[in-house]
Amino acid sequence: MRREPVWQPQSRVRPRTVPASLWHWLVDTASLTQRIVYYCDQGFRVQVINQKWQRPMRNEARLLQLKQGNHALVRQVYLYCGDTPWVYARTILPPDTLTGPQRRLANLKSRSLGAMLFADPSMQRDEVQIACLTAQDKLFNLATRASEAAPEVIWGRRSVFRLSNKPLLVTEIFLPPVQKCPL
């Protein structure tokens, strides 16, 4: 049985434990979409893997203060540079978050969530958490499914965003091509 990733607050992660080429990607608090667009000269796109109502993982539900067993809208996508997936992203949207103007988040299709988040003046972001994932972690196989060859480890970050004080959890797992980007 696969385990849930172990997430640590960024403030407790030592930079030297993370590949140097990834550290700035993990701790950058600006829009990941904009960063990929900046570094990608082959065209950015979002591919939706799936989006459906399901139970979040226990650690996701706990972070969003959802009761165990409650459902949320789970959106999983790859962020591509040209034909290469750079990032696997997973968003957990509690039902109460998808009310009022935020209900548009349920109908993003292949549009970038990041573009909408960073354009919203009410957006607030909690501290970034970082994890190193291996094949024993639940998200590892999902994240590496589109990769040519699965690496031994991958690194990810997550944080709770709030739009008009309504929470959503965004997890971003960086795939090997990101490590080849110049900084």
Image (cartoon, grey):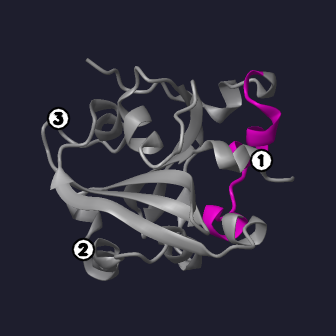
Residue at mark 3 = 68
Residue at mark 1 = 180
Residue 109's tag is none
Q: Residues within 10 Å of mark 2 (few under 14, many from 20)?
A: few
Question: In the image, is 103 to the left or to the right of 178?
Answer: left
Residue 25 position, x and y percent, is 71, 48
* Above or below: residue 11 compared with residue 178: above
User: Upstream in the sequence, badge 3 or badge 1?
Assistant: 3
In front: label 2 or label 1: 1
Q: Residue at x 69, y 25 (%)?
A: 13
Q: What's drawn in magenta, residue-wise?
A: 17-35
In magenta segment, residue 21: yes
Q: Residue at x 56, y 39 (%)?
A: 156
Question: In the image, is 63 to the left or to the right of 171?
Answer: left
Tell me the chief SS of the magenta region: helix
Residue 99's tag is 2
- Quadrant assignment, res 62: top left
Q: Residue at x 27, y 31 (%)?
A: 58
Residue 139 position, x and y percent, is 39, 36
Q: Can you say which quadrant of the picture contains the N terminus? A: top left
Which amino acid is tagged 3? Answer: Gln
Q: Residue at x 55, y 75 (%)?
A: 115
CA–CA distance in space, label 3 to label 2: 21 Å
* Above or below: residue 150 compared with residue 70: above
Residue 105 position, x and y percent, is 34, 73
Q: Nearer the viewer, residue 5 or 99?
A: 5
